[in-house]
């Protein structure tokens, strides 16, 4: 008998199952974009048939990192910037578990930047949602890696001399096989994109624009967005790297000028996930490793078998 | 010490085949019935530089490299040549003869490659020194012999043939090992060179030296392996099936051995972007239910202090290995030191709890790695195995049957779905993962994917279902519960297992020597010598760093008049720990310290002991230092 009966449970799931009954009410400020992510995720999960017990949401530290406190799934609230290494190992250990990682722009593109690059490069089969509010929220409004050039904050009083990083382009060049941007002010698209990302077999990165009315009222991202998939002005083949790269550059420039473009930028269905690559070269078992510890009939190999070469 | 011992040193440059040649030579000696111990000295560079491996072999047990050596095989240049440019890398001043003569014992043998070295030119006073020390010199054209049947690089085979002939050693085991390692023309050529060199020496030379290969007999089949091997094998037998790491000397050895074996064992190895990720992956895999480990050396372990604290707070079991080298910072990458003890005990913020074991021998490395996993998974706490570059690379022989143990795939305090169903949940269905009321502090966990086991793991302080909480009462309960685990582990180690401390010498001795980790063997040899020359001494090699074996150490210190604490660092970190834990005996313990990059030799410990006991702690002339006792 499996030790993980929740995995693959295909019953109908009620959206409310993801909402904890008694648990803490969100500490997010009124109007915070983070509510949008929570809502979209709660809608997407039942849609793709994932039960709370088979879902693990790993977060970093920040206002964004509280996501899994308000979600009734398995959760791992890790440390600042480290949700990805924790999440991807959990996925390798038990591929049946739906693994979603989330965190802020400081968390994911700053302190965790190295992990972001490498997780995308390896194309782990998981979803990564970055709450991009162009600011450090929880530590009270310092400049973040996505704040625009010239942005003034208490720690950069003369205005930032740095240009913002380009998360979509970075993700694409690093190797993510699904890259999208959506916004809290656009709940329907957000839900659809999250559902798609979860179903995508590979590393799906969503740059999720979340407004921070408390520290970043000036952000341009409050203006109405344009869904590039719906607009006649923008037309690109999401499976074509070059076209995707061009669209991303355009989007990343326009964002700071007040035109918010959202939607799918790049979708590569053909690239094998990291897990598949590892299995293909014989460096990962077909059966979930975590199951093995509960399998009484499994014959554990011993080091004594390795001693020949030491004799 | 035994009088009848061979300590064979093969010296040359990195890339001269020193490692493989010495490995085979050591195995051949082991197969002929001897006990062996190898010591590797190498510089932090890929080619060239001064490298040697020493193999000590005797009928009796050998526990350390010994003092000095008695047979030198000086191979080529100590600096490598770049064949394309015909240029040399490195420092031409360091040559295998000059560099190695200081430690050669009186009456010893020198074999050097006359095809590459000119002793007179290299060392102006060579003849004088030879006569003074009664050395027996054999200048033989090893390179020429190698070229005759094969290629110049095969000169190490010629060297082995020559020393075998000089020592009256049978070629059989060496030939067998060559046959295992190579085939075809290469094997034929090597066998030919070996035999030629052997015959040449037997035919052309008269032996005036007394040194012969000792004889011995093993009761059962032996295996030769290093501390790093033992740690890796201990982990495998304990059901570890996930490792993540980033290379750093000397941790790389464990990482490599695991990576080469785990896939065959159905496990996963991940080389990742940095050490923060490495330890965080181990946390993630363990959280999802796989027994996992990571590790590094000083600098990399510094990066791991973040995930280490996360594992502590979320009560996720992991095992980390810390392979010490000389610090601070990148220090001396290929030289051993025991300078990271405090780093390992106290790194990471807050009142932290972890299990730390410091094995003293290859066998202990295996046992204590298994014990570290057991404690980590039963008690949901990080466990660290700390050792050093010396134990990592040295090879000793053990009975093959030592490894004939049952594997332990038990994932520890994990619930089944049936048990989860019976356990406490809050009103919204969240499982009380972090319970208050447990007697040993352990609150069993569920794994993602199990029905009904949902909870939040967080590095913030949290309540039973895992929600972030700053409630003062909950904080104290949780903190006390986590701390209780260490006390429970201490009790279990005291009551249910054999002591991991290793005692040596007569129980009723007047004096004690205390050491930890890799210095244990040298200390035990020193104790034997001291007792032979009329002193009354015993020793203890301490392995439990946290929880500290208070009762055992109190008993030991109570039983002696005075104790010498031997460790390889400049600040007496282990003596400090002992004083901190026991709060007493500060005036009973004197430190003997060494931190020049080389481990203690038994004679240095004998000398240090005599200096302290007979002369009240005169400073020593060698690389060692006495740090006087402190008042309580
Ligand atoms: C190692 C470390 N450094 C700094 C912090 C303090 N810290 C907590 S959250 C945060 C920034 C969060 O910003 P972001 O990731 O953009 O998330 P947001 O709060 O905006 O959602 C910082 C610097 C920390 N917890 N850990
Ligand atoms: S500070 Fe900003 S990001 Fe944080 S909760 Fe408030 S609005 Fe949201």
Image (spheres, rainbow, N blue to C red):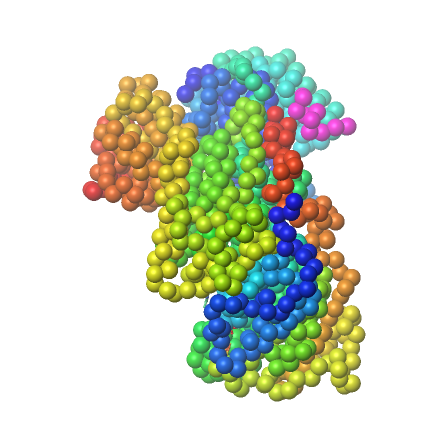
Closer to the camera, A92 or B23?
A92
Residue A305 point in image, percent of width and height: 63, 30
From the viewer's perspective, tell me whether residue A199 is left or right of residue B350.
right
Residue B589 point in image, percent of width and height: 26, 36
User: Relative to residue A114, is residue A218 depicted above or below?
Assistant: below
- The kind of secondary structure the magenta stretch mainly shows is helix
- Residue B605: tell me if it is visible: no
User: Relative to residue B171, is residue B363 depicted above or below?
Assistant: below
Point out the stretch of residues depicted in magenta: B175-184
Which part of the image, by quadrant, shows the N terminus of chain A? top right
- Residue A49: tell me if it is visible: yes
The residue under the point 75% across, 84% down is: A231
User: Relative to residue B572, is residue A106 depicted above or below?
Assistant: below
Q: Quadrant of residue B611?
A: top left
Please identify the residue farthest to the left as the structure is shown.
B631
From the viewer's perspective, tell me whether residue B319 is left or right of residue A273.
left
Residue B474 point in image, percent of width and height: 37, 60
Which part of the image, by quadrant, shows the C terminus of chain A? top right
Closer to the camera, A225 or B59?
A225
From the viewer's perspective, tell me whether residue B186 is left or right of residue B310.
right
The residue under the point 38% across, 33% down is: B495
Magenta region includes residue B109: no
The residue under the point 48% across, 43% down is: B378
Magenta region includes residue B176: yes
The residue under the point 78% across, 80% down is: A235
User: Relative to residue A270, is residue B409 depicted above or below?
Assistant: above
Closer to the camera, B616 or B462?
B462
Residue A173 point in image, percent of width and height: 69, 67
């Amino acid at each position: 008998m499996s030790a993980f009966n929740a995995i693959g449970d295909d019953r109908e799931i009620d959206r409310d199952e993801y909402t904890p009954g008694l648990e803490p009410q969100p500490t997010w400020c009124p109007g915070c974009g983070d509510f949008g992510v929570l809502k979209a995720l709660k809608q997407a999960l039942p849609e793709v048939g994932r039960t709370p017990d088979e879902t693990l949401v790993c977060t970093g530290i920040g206002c964004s990192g509280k996501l899994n406190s308000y979600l009734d799934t398995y959760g791992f609230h890790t440390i600042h910037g480290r949700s990805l290494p924790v999440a991807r190992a959990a996925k390798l250990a038990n591929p049946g578990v739906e693994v979603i990682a989330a965190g802020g722009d400081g968390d994911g593109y700053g302190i965790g930047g190295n992990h972001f690059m490498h997780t995308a490069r390896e194309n782990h089969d998981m979803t990564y949602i970055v709450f991009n509010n162009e600011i450090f929220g929880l530590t009270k409004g310092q400049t973040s890696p996505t704040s625009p050039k010239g942005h003034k904050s208490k720690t950069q009083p003369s205005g930032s001399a740095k240009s913002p990083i380009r998360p979509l382009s970075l993700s694409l060049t690093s190797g993510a096989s699904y890259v999208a941007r959506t916004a809290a002010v656009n709940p329907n698209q957000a839900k659809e994109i999250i559902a798609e990302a979860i179903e995508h077999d590979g590393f799906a990165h969503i740059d999720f624009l979340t407004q921070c009315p408390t520290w970043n009222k000036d952000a341009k991202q409050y203006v109405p967005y344009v869904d590039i998939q719906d607009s006649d002005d923008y037309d690109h083949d999401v499976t074509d790297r070059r076209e995707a790269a061009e669209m991303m550059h355009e989007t990343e420039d326009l964002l700071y000028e007040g035109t918010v473009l959202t939607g799918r930028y790049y979708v590569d269905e053909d690239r094998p996930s990291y897990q598949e690559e590892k299995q293909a070269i014989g460096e990962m078992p077909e059966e979930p490793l975590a199951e093995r510890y509960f399998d009484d009939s499994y014959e554990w190999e011993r080091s004594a078998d390795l001693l020949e070469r030491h004799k | 010490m035994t009088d009848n011992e061979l300590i064979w040193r093969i010296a040359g440059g990195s890339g001269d085949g020193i490692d493989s040649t010495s490995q085979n030579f050591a195995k051949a000696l082991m197969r002929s019935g001897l006990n062996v111990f190898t010591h590797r000295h190498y510089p932090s560079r890929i080619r060239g530089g001064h490298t040697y491996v020493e193999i000590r072999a005797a009928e009796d047990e050998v526990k350390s490299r010994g003092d000095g050596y008695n047979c030198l095989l000086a191979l080529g240049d100590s600096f490598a040549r770049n064949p394309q440019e015909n240029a040399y890398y490195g420092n031409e001043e360091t040559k295998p003869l000059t560099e190695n003569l200081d430690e050669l014992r009186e009456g010893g043998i020198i074999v050097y490659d006359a095809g590459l070295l000119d002793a007179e030119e290299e060392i102006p006073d060579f003849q004088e020194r030879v006569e003074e020390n009664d050395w027996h010199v054999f200048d033989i054209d090893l390179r020429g012999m190698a070229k005759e049947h094969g290629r110049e690089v095969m000169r190490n085979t010629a060297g082995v043939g020559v020393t075998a002939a000089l020592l009256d050693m049978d070629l059989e085991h060496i030939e067998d090992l060559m046959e295992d390692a190579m085939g075809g023309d290469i094997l034929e050529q090597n066998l030919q060179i070996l035999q030629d060199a052997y015959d040449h020496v037997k035919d052309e030379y008269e032996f005036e030296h007394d040194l012969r290969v000792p004889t011995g007999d093993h009761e059962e089949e032996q295996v030769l392996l290093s501390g790093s091997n033992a740690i890796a094998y201990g982990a495998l037998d304990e059901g570890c099936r996930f490792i993540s790491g980033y290379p750093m000397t000397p941790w790389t050895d464990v990482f490599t051995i695991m990576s080469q074996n785990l896939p065959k064992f159905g496990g996963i190895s991940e080389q990742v972007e940095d050490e923060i990720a490495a330890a965080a992956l181990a946390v993630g895999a363990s959280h999802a239910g796989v027994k996992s480990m990571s590790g590094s050396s000083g600098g990399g372990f510094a990066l791991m202090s973040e995930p280490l604290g996360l594992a502590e707070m979320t009560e996720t079991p992991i095992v980390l290995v810390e392979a010490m080298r000389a610090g601070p910072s990148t220090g001396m990458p290929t030289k051993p030191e025991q300078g990271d003890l405090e780093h390992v005990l106290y790194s990471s913020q807050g009142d932290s709890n972890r299990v730390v074991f410091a094995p003293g021998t290859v066998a202990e490395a295996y046992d204590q790695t298994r014990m570290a996993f057991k404690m980590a998974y039963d008690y949901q706490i990080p466990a660290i195995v700390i050792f050093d570059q010396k134990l990592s690379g040295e090879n000793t022989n053990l009975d093959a049957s030592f490894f004939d143990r049952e594997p332990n795939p038990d994932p520890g305090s994990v619930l089944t779905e049936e048990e989860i169903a019976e356990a406490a949940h809050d009103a919204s269905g969240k499982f009380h993962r972090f319970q208050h009321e447990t007697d040993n502090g352990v609150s069993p966990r569920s794994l993602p994917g199990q029905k009904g086991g949902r909870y939040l793991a967080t590095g913030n302080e949290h309540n039973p279902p895992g929600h972030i909480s700053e409630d003062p009462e909950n904080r104290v309960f949780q903190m006390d519960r986590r701390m209780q685990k260490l006390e429970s582990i201490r009790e279990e180690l005291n009551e249910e297992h054999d002591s991991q401390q290793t005692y040596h010498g007569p129980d009723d001795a007047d004096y004690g020597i205390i050491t930890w980790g890799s210095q244990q063997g040298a200390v035990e040899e020193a104790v034997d010598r001291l007792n032979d020359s009329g002193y009354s001494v015993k020793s203890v090699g301490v392995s439990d760093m946290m929880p500290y074996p208070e009762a055992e150490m109190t008993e030991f210190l109570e039983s002696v008049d005075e104790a010498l604490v031997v460790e390889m660092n400049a600040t007496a970190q282990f003596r400090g720990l002992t004083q901190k834990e026991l709060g007493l005996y500060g005036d009973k313990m004197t430190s003997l310290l060494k931190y020049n990059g080389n481990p203690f030799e038994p004679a240095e410990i004998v000398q240090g002991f005599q200096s302290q006991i007979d002369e009240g702690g005169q400073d020593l002339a060698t690389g060692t230092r006495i740090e006087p006792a402190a008042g309580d």
